[in-house]
Image: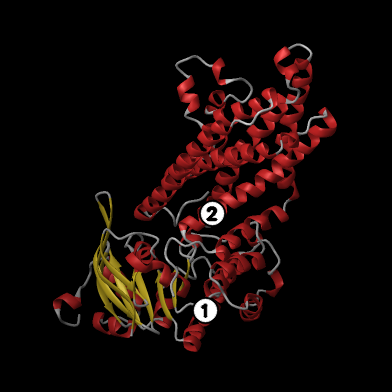
Amino acid sequence: MTAIRASAVSKSFGTVKAVDDISFEVAAGSTTALLGGNGAGKTTTLSMLLGLLIPSSGTITVLGEDMARHRYRVLPRLNFSSPYVDLPHRLSVRENLTVYGHLYGVPRLKHRIAELIDELELGEFIDRQSGKLSAGQKTRVALAKALLNHPALLLLDEPTASLDPDTADWVRGYFQSYRDRTGATILLASHNMTEVERMCDQVLIMKQGRIVDRGSPAALIDRYGRDTLEEVFLDIARDRRRPALEGQRP
Amino acid sequence: MTPSPASLSRRRIGAMCLRHLYILKGSWPRVLEMAYWPAINMVVWGFTSQFLSGNSTWVARAGGVLIGAVILWDVMFRGNLGVALTFMEEMWSRNLGHLSVSPLRPHELVASMLCMSLIRTVIGVLPAALLAIPLYHYSIFTLGLPLLAFWANLMISGWAMGLGVSALVLRFGLGAESLAWVLIFAVAPLAGIYYPISTLPAWLQPVAWALPPAHVFEGMRAVMFEGRFRADLLASALALNVFYLMVGVGLFLRVWHGARERGTLLNVGE
């Protein structure tokens, strides 16, 4: 089963090609990372998968539906989290979850919110204004919003950016357990190599709008003859060695 | 069965209204401010009206014509502001990204903005209208059923303008937010709020008649001065309003689509 299929997708802003003819598939129930430096096209790719951004060319199929034609059939079944957006600051956490619960048509909403309060330990600040929370608390709330509708597909843009190591570790653990429990598919864009190594089955490495390499973290590390994914990333970012193209181990 | 793309979900529109009602519930100064300016405006024009009624035969012929006008003008002003502020609240709170990947359709967002505008206008204008009764012994409610027609038409005019402003703010960013307060005043001189359209220079009168509020305020004066309801003025105001509202909705939805092409929905905000 394929959760996401992108075929020859490009996005240009004027003369700038942000994403250049990328194709990939994400298997249902897997966790995949989009890895790349700043401006590599990760957020643009995620935005196109969500339908926030219309591709200049190419086709995107998400959960079996063509996003150009049937986006609203898919949206109730996916959710996302991004550091570029916030929940309304003046609403309490409970009010925000209630509003989004109604928007997503979540059945037995009060019960679902109570579940999330319990699972994500929101009880201490559930009635506090969202704008008055710490970064760690805000991340938990963003996570609660992202999980409110039991999404079959989670798209996460830098899910642990600006979190302390303890909270970041807790968040990663939560995503893994959510995937294991529900069989959901997770696609995340990240700069954090440890996170990607720990969480992901597949990595798509982007550079200047193109996918320049792909594979499981272990396969990439092996192919580049490195010890960590970070070293692989630096090799690619600095054009040091391209074994995949040369067809030999360095 | 999947609902058609054009169908409206009351649940989702209600959720968006609930989101804004939560803000009002949590901030009584906001609610007070909504009622404050229309009330102050009405008080100023009330005294002006009292003064003029002893010095102007025109005002003396229909006591309350200026107070009625200022209250109805506030309906249009608040209608416009209600739509634009409801939308800008989403931009200020950087919430558009979440909304645009939720199942909420753009036209449902528009419908919720209009609902909230109605609620905000009632909160803003009703206290001023009620205050005029003990202060100046003038009740706008004596206009009877025509009042509903005037209110509805001015409200729709405000909606059309508010949607246009929201589209401009979405297109050009929050730097354009002051348009919500200032653009409507470009219409004020042509709307004939306090004077008949015949007062305007001949070359400007066709421009005024192309605007729905000119028909509404002429209609209001016809009721107050002549005691008759001008259905022709109401019909022309309604026809113009339908046209302008369609333009406003169309413009907003076009700009929304353009924002998805330019990728600005994710990173709009303060």
Residue nearest the observer in this picture, A245 or B113: B113
Rendered location of residue B181, percent (x, y): 57, 35
**Amino acid type indicated by mark 2:** Ala
Q: Is residue A12 left or right of residue A72?
A: left
**Amino acid type indicated by mark 1:** His
**Image quadrant where one finds the N terminus of chain A:** bottom left
- The lab-note entry on whether marks 2 and 1 share a chain reads no
CA gap, disc 2 to disc 1? 27 Å
Name the quadrant containing residue A20: bottom left
Which chain letter matches label 2?
Answer: B
Question: For mark 2, what is the residue?
Answer: B111
- Colouring mode (rainbow / by chain / secondary structure / one colour): secondary structure
Q: Furthest-left residue in view?
A: A246
Rendered location of residue A213, percent (x, y): 25, 74
Q: Is residue B243 left or right of residue B86?
A: left
Q: What's the residue at 50%, 80% (across, down)?
A: A175
Q: Considering only vertical position in the picture, is B124 above or below A58? A: above
Local secondary structure at mark 2: helix
Q: Visible in this render: residue B78?
A: no
Cβ atoms under marks 2 and 1 closer than 8 Å: no
Q: Exactly how many numbered labels are in the figure?
A: 2
Residue nearest the observer in this picture, B51 or A180: B51
Which chain letter matches label 1?
Answer: A
Q: Visible in this render: residue A201?
A: yes
Residue nearest the observer in this picture, A102 or B10: B10
Question: For mark 1, what is the residue?
Answer: A150
Q: Considering only vertical position in the picture, is B270 above or below B200? A: below
Neighbour tally class for label 1: few under 14, some 14-19, many 20 plus, Cα within 10 Å: some
